[in-house]
């Protein structure tokens, strides 16, 4: 193996170790999300085009066989959204992820899970009607290549729905890179401890009274005119420091741990992201963006 291949294998292994811990029963994010549906609405996975897509998959799977591959399925959230009662009669759901807590995912028994690297094709030359990859592609070593691999597993007429991290202001990008350079090499325990500092910073900024008024757009800085709370202004433009009163302290730490510690966290402009679909001959049918992430649905021609 060449040096860069060894580094990639090592980074993928560290990504798996990070998420084995993050999605493990000790942290129980799954339990938190299920018990606090209103709090979970702040997550990008509850926004963008996801709910609408899940509804369409469920409608189709109620009347005809429909295969779904959930690449980087994490803690099983999408499985539980797709397989909510009444479970569509013809849905065939497969979730795959590299982390080691996959066996602990609590989902309806018809859901199948495999430990697999989405950067490689699944064994058996399977094709899927829907491939969903929510907030996971950017954690792979080469997301453009991974996207190509996912696209190659779409059935004719199939849909590939992906969300990725959005590029932020130049200040936020620089701070993210500098802090990730310090935190990525840490072991999980040290990175959880580091995450605590971001949670406390977010909490203290949120407790700071007053508003920041920006009187004119500053395009170079990526700042728009408007009134901001102290926390929103710093968070959106300068440094991610998640704190939310509806989340427990540990689950606030989880969001910061999730941002700063995984070895890869590629970020994209809308055009860069669209290029992934276009370069693979797919047709973009839906695109949405929020500050944190971009979402894109693209389809393979039925004639392919
Ligand atoms: C932020 S989580 C998102 C989980 C899930 N898609 C969701 O939205 O709830 C990112 C997930 O991508 C997984 N992941 C990262 N690299 C991967 C790879 N090469 N193959 C499969 N899964 C991967 C991680 O293990 C983690 O569970």
Image (cartoon, grey):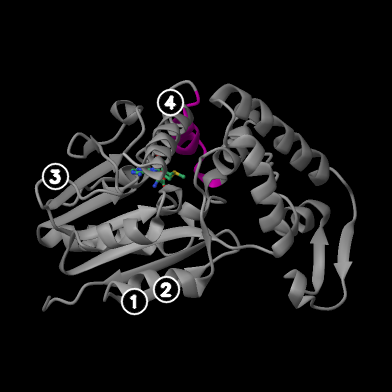
- Between the C-alphas of marks 1 and 3, the distance is 26 Å
Nearest to N terminus: mark 4 or mark 3? 4
Residue 274's disc number:
2
Residue 130 is situated, as x and y percent measured from the top left of the image, at 23, 60
Kindly tell me whether mark 1's CB lies below 8 Å from ligand 1. no
Of mark 1 and mark 4, the one earlier in the sequence is 4
Disc 1 element:
helix
Spatial separation of the CA atoms under disc 1 and disc 4:
37 Å
Q: Looking at the image, is mark 1 or mark 4 nearer the viewer?
A: 1
Residue placed under numbered mark 3 in the picture: 123
Q: Which mark is residue 24?
A: 4
Q: Quadrant of ligand 1?
A: top left
Disc 3 element: loop
Determine contact: label 1, label 4, CB under 8 Å: no
Which one is nearer the viewer's eye here, 106 or 7? 7
Residue 74 found in image quarter: top left
């Amino acid at each position: 193996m060449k040096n860069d291949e060894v580094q990639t294998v090592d980074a993928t292994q560290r990504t798996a170790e990070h998420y084995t811990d993050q999605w493990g029963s000790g942290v129980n994010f799954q339990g938190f999300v299920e018990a606090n549906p209103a709090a979970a609405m702040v997550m990008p996975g509850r926004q963008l085009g996801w709910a609408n897509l899940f509804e369409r998959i469920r409608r189709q799977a109620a009347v005809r066989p429909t295969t779904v591959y959930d690449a980087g399925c994490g803690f099983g959230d999408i499985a539980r959204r797709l397989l909510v009662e009444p479970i569509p009669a013809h849905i065939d759901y497969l979730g795959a992820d590299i982390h080691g807590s996959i066996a602990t995912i609590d989902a309806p028994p018809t859901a199948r899970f495999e430990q697999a690297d989405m950067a490689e094709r699944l064994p058996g030359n399977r094709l899927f009607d829907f491939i969903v990859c929510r907030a996971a592609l950017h954690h792979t070593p080469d997301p453009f290549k991974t996207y190509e691999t996912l696209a190659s597993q779409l059935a004719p007429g199939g849909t590939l729905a992906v969300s990725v991290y959005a590029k932020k202001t130049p200040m936020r990008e620089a701070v993210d890179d500098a802090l990730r350079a310090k935190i990525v090499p840490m072991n999980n325990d040290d990175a959880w401890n580091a995450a605590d500092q971001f949670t406390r910073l977010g909490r203290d900024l949120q407790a700071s009274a007053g508003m920041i008024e920006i009187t004119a757009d500053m395009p170079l800085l990526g700042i728009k005119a408007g009134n901001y709370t102290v926390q929103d202004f710093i968070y959106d433009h300068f440094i991610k420091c998640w704190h939310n009163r509806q989340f427990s302290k540990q689950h606030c730490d989880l969001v910061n741990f999730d941002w700063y510690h995984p070895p890869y966290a590629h970020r994209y402009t809308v055009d860069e992201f669209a290029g992934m679909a276009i370069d693979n001959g797919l047709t973009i049918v839906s695109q949405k963006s929020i500050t944190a992430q971009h979402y894109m649905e693209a389809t393979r021609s039925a004639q392919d």
